[in-house]
Image: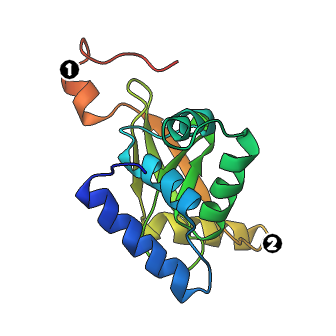
Amino acid sequence: MDDFSLTTTALLDKAANICAQRGAKLTELRRQVLGHILDSPAPAGAYDLLERLRTSRGPSAPPTVYRALDFLLEQGLVHRVERLSAFIACIEDHGHAHGAQFLICGQCRRVTEIEDRNVDHALRKAAAQAGFSLTGATVEAIGICADCSLNPAESSPAS
């Protein structure tokens, strides 16, 4: 069993309740994967998660993690940050999926999720003007976070 922080444990309980309300189940494996994502200081890649699971569950095959991640994505409990091929948690009951915008620091790789309805509205309006019916959108903006801007010598460049 993994020892997650009290904050992470509370978020995992919230995620389990969200799943239960939808008739889905946050199994122990899914809970562990989500817990590791929540506890990660930066977006977590699938192989990073697999390695963390090995310490508590023993050897696991990559499809094990990918199936858990697919479930978490379907439930809207994590987002995939395409630029980093990694995942961040989103434990809010928005419905299954929602549009999001990510601010990605090109130095330290930290990701901040924002949900600006004006951005979503502008995308939907532009899509409609082009005769396109938008069903979802994720925006990934690259820049430098406040910490890296203030302390450029202490930041390590992202690879």
Q: Secondary structure at mark 2?
A: loop
Relative vertical location of residue 84 with respect to residue 152 in this rendering, above or below = below
Q: Amino acid at mark 1?
A: Asn
Relative vertical location of residue 54 with respect to residue 154 in this rendering, above or below = below
Residue receiving disc 2 = 131
**Disc 1 crowd, CA 10 A, few/some/many (<14, 14-19, 20+):** few
Which numbered mark, 1 or 2, is in the foreground of this view?
1
**Disc 2 crowd, CA 10 A, few/some/many (<14, 14-19, 20+):** few
Residue furthest toward the top? 153
Q: Which mark is residue 151?
A: 1
Gap between marks 1 and 2 measured at Cα? 46 Å
Q: Nearer the viewer, residue 33 or 75?
A: 33
Q: Is residue 80 visible?
A: yes
Residue 134 spot, x, y in % from top left: 71, 71
Q: Amino acid at mark 2?
A: Gly
Relative vertical location of residue 124 with respect to residue 18 in this rendering, above or below = above
Q: Residue at x 39, y 23 (%)?
A: 107
Q: Residue 46 vs residue 1: left or right?
A: right
Residue 129 spot, x, y in % from top left: 72, 71
What is the image's colouring?
rainbow
Residue 70 spot, x, y in % from top left: 69, 58
Q: Nearer the viewer, residue 12 or 92?
A: 12
Q: Which mark is residue 60?
A: none
Residue 100 spot, x, y in % from top left: 51, 61
Quarter location, residue 149: top left
Q: Secondary structure at mark 1?
A: loop
